[in-house]
Structures are given as C-alpha cells and as structure tokens.
Amino acid sequence: MSEPHQVDVVVVGLGVGGEEVAGRLAQAGLRVVGVERRLVGGECPYWGCVPSKMMIRAANALAEGRRIAGLAGAADVRPDWAPVARRIRDEATADWTDAAAVDRLSTKGVRVVRGTARLTGKGEVTVDDQQQFTARLGVVIATGTTPVVPPIDGLVGTPYWTNRQAIEVTELPESLVVLGGGAIGLELAQVFARFGVRVTVVEGGQRLLSMEEPESSALAARVFAAEGVRVCTGTRAERVEHRDDTFVVHLSDGGPESGQRLLVATGRRGDLGELGLDAVGLNPASRYLSVDERMRVADGMWAVGDIAGHGAFTHVAMYQADVAIRNILGQGGPAADYRAVSRVTFTDPEIGAVGLTERQAREQGIDVRVAVTEVPDSSRGWIHGPGNEGFVKLVADGRRGVLVGATSAGPTGGEVLGALAVAVHGEVPLASLRHMIYAYPTVHRAILSAVQQLT
C-alpha cells in the first residue's frame, strides 16, 4: 500500500447526496476525494427517479390515448416498448456509463477514486486495500441502499429481477409477478401492464402502500383492478420455482401465481457491513447510521442520503447534503427538520403525501381533525373526466389549528402536493388557508374544499 494521501474530506459514495457534498466542498476550496465503486450519480439517474419516470410518462401517454374515446373521438393505441428502452439507454443513462458525471465532479476539483472504501481509523479511509487517505476535517458516508431480497425458498439462483433489471429490459415479458406493493412495485407494475404485460402484484401486508393512508391503498387497488392488474394482499411468497422460462410463486394462502418474469420489490436497506464501522467504534450490524440534526454520526464523520435513515428519497439526500456542507464549512444555518418530508408514488393517479398520516398523528397524541375531498367531485375533477380518480386528505392539529400531514392523490397529485408541503412545513394557520384565493378551475381547489370542513 502507498503512503497515505493527506486531504481535507473523503466522501464515500457518490450518489446524489455524496456528489453534491463532494462538488460543493471542492468548489469551496477544500481538497476532496470521492470514492465510488459503481456509477457516479448513484441509483437515481441510472435505475431510479430518471429512467423510471420516463417509463411512467410513456405508460401514461398510452392510458391517455385510450381515454380519447370518451372525450374526443377515437384512437388506435398500439404499445411499443422499443422507443422507451432506447430513450432510457441513450438519453437517461448513456448506456449505464458515468463519464459525464465523473467529468462534472472532476471539473469542480474532486478527485474521483474507483473502488470499495473501508474505514480503517478516525478520518482514515482505505480503498481496495491499495490506497489510503487521511482526512483532516472528516469523512462523509453516502453509500445509499440496496434492494432487499427476502429469504424465500428457491429464489436464490433464479434470474429474478430487482428494479435494476426491470429498468434495463429491452423486450417485455408476456407476464410478470411483482413481490411488493410499495411505491417501486406499483409504479413498475402499472407501467408494464399498460404495455400489455399480464401483471400480478403480491403484497404480504393487508393493503397496498401500507405506509400511506388507507384511502391511498384503496384508490390504488381500485385503479389496478380496473386496469386488469391482479392484486393479492395479505399473502406471502413461501416458495419459488423457475422452470421452462416461467416463475411459479407459491403463496401462503394457497396460490400459486405464475409469470415469465419475477420482480422483487420488497424494500431497500443500507449495507454497512463492508464499511469497517468497528474501526471507528460504530456497530457494523446497524441498519442505518444514526445522525444528529447536523448530519453528524460522530466527531469528524457525517452521513447523508438513504444511509442516514430518513427515507430513500433523492430530495431528502440533497437537503441533508446542504445541512452537512454548512456544518463542515462552519457556516451554521438551519438544522435538519423532517416535519414535512414529501413523497410521491408515481402511479396514475399520482399519490403524494407530506408529514404525518392520520394514524401517526394519533399515535403522537395530537388532537386530530381530518377532512377528505374527492377529486371527481371537484370542479376540475369533473371537467377532467376519465382518469380523474383521487382525493385530498388533510390531517390537522385541532389545538394549534395547523396541518400536520396531507395526502394529494389524483392526475396531478405530486404537483398539488407542493402547496400542502408549504402549509405543513410553514405551519400555516387553517384560517389563512381558508381565506386564500385558489386558482380556478384547478385540482388545488380540492384543498379549499377540505379546509372548509376543518374551519
């Protein structure tokens, strides 16, 4: 091993959060090394946010085309996966190469090192047992998460998909079984179904989107049933067989369900085992790294992104990166605040949520007040016609007269959520929301209808 290189900061993992930290610290004049063993940019640009939304955009265009008959005449809609796969490969991922991302960081002054990083002491990082770096200010961990693959009998050794293989596919299967009824599983299930794939979703919990409001689960189940997607809830995969290019999934309630391909979308987890956390007095068996309000794990160590345990969201990683950067540079400013974390499941309808669910609010002892407005009953929902399923649900603290959570589900649910996120984060009084002037006719006015029920 060569002599240790003296630098200011080492960033381990160059996904969206790590890349932001490394780039901005280098631009501030620090000597920064960024270590990445896969692709600079991480999950989002190559297998997550960007390519999946290209798929969703294409699938939604098909759905809109099929709605023409009820609105504007007739249309002959013929799905073709080829332009979708080509756009993902050429426009989004550059065929899964990261030369542009590496150049972007290098231009800012970051030294990008390929390999697997391991902590070998305080402020000390070793890469592939060949290069060693000593960081004067400290180390930032941003290694993200990986798909959870449950220990199902017979699954290991089969050509099952995670989200990565699903994103990379160039030819669609005839049928698909999806394990997991969370955001990733549902988004991909609807995409493939709209392109003509026979899809079955298997969810071990009693409802889809179990972390969201029950109304969101019911909406997703209703829409999927109408689109021909088979949904099995309250049952688990106990055994998997793969033979003759077919997966057979045996379920706890009797099953089985079969498909040409099997997508495992049962969650994500941090992988801390290879980081050498014990060398700095931390538990390598931890699921996530525990951070304070300044993203500090310990003296001279920070963590940002999924690995910090506040949700697998790109926007949260960027937010945390800003907090960590300011702390490293001694700039002060606001601490991390997760009262109004926004999240969107990009099915059609989109299901957006911010802050606490009704159940979470009650568990915290809040004086809960709830209001729900159905989008089809609003003026814009009625005008919209086919594809207008959705609702706005507000969760308020009756004592303080402010929103603590909200859900916006509908054809523009993710965009309508913006107004609700501001209301929750800023603790805008319900009286103020009641007397705002909302643009007409927009789905946003469903917020007003719900607020009127609370005031």
Image: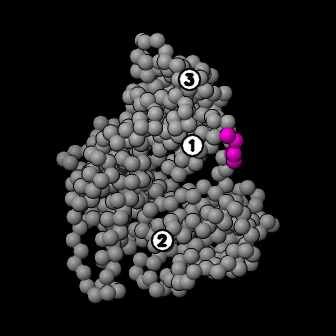
Q: Quadrant of the N terminus?
A: top left
**Which residue position holds label 2?**
412
What amino acid does circle 1 point to?
A: Ala
Residue at image coords 51%, 35%: 26
Res. 295 in view: no
**Which residue position holds label 3?**
135
Do labels 2 and 1 touch, CB within 8 Å?
A: no
Density class for disc 3 (Cα within 10 Å; few <14, some 14-19, many ≥20) is many
Q: Nearer the viewer, residue 388 or 19?
A: 19
Q: Is residue 146 above or below residue 247?
A: above
What amino acid does circle 3 point to?
A: Ala
Give the side of residue 210 with respect to residue 179, left or right. Answer: right
Tag 3 secondary structure: strand
Give the side of residue 14 with respect to residue 335, left or right. Answer: left
Q: Nearer the viewer, residue 447 or 27?
A: 27
User: Could you say where residue 318 lies in the image, as x and y percent from the top left?
Assistant: 54, 47
Mark nearer the viewer, 3 or 2? 3
Q: Quadrant of residue 332?
A: top right
User: Could you say where residue 138 lies in the image, as x and y percent from the top left?
Assistant: 59, 27
As measured in the structure, the alpha-carbon distance from the residue carrying label 3 to the one carrying label 2 is 46 Å
Q: Is residue 330 above or below residue 425?
A: above
As measured in the structure, the alpha-carbon distance from the residue carrying label 2 to the one carrying label 1 is 28 Å
Q: Is residue 19 above or below residue 367?
A: above
**Which residue position holds label 1?**
321
Q: Nearer the viewer, residue 395 or 420?
A: 420
**Sequence-earlier tag: 1 or 3:** 3
As measured in the structure, the alpha-carbon distance from the residue carrying label 1 to the one carrying label 3 is 18 Å
Give the side of residue 172 with respect to residue 229, left or right. Answer: left
The span picked out in magenta is 331-335
